[in-house]
Image (tube, rainbow, N blue to C red):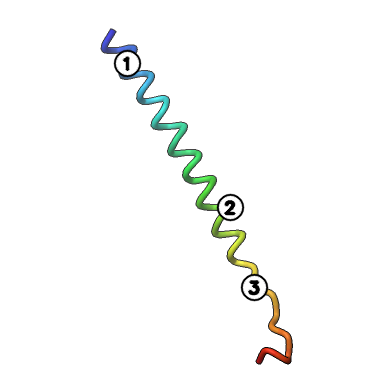
Amino acid sequence: MAKIKYLVLTGLVTIVTILATITAVSACAATHYQPELPKSLR
């Protein structure tokens, strides 16, 4: 029973780590774009 619990928890941690990495990469890519400021705002 302990081995099954260990395998399930290891799988969950792996999935959560992958999701966190994907979220961080997409957030960085989304904030990297900076449009040019209009002349009236400079």
Tag 3 or tag 1, which sits nearer the N-term?
A: 1
Q: CA distance from mark 3 to mark 2?
A: 15 Å
Residue with the mark numbered 2: 26
Q: How many marks?
A: 3
Q: Amino acid at mark 1?
A: Lys
Which residue lies at the image location 48% right of the left edge and 38% below the top edge?
18
Q: Amino acid at mark 3?
A: Gln
- Quadrant of the frame with the N terminus: top left
Tag 1 or tag 2, which sits nearer the N-term?
A: 1
Q: Amino acid at mark 2?
A: Ser
Q: Would residue 40 be found to the left or right of residue 25 on screen?
A: right
Marks 1 & 3, CB-CB < 8 Å contact: no
Q: Nearer the viewer, residue 39 or 23?
A: 39
Instruction: Give x and y (percent) for residue 26.
Output: 58, 52
Q: Is residue 11 shown above or below 37?
A: above
Residue with the mark numbered 3: 34
Residue with the mark numbered 1: 5
Give the SS element for disc 1.
helix
Give the SS element for disc 3.
loop
Q: Residues within 10 Å of mark 1 (few under 14, many from 20)?
A: few
Q: Is residue 4 shown above or below 25?
A: above
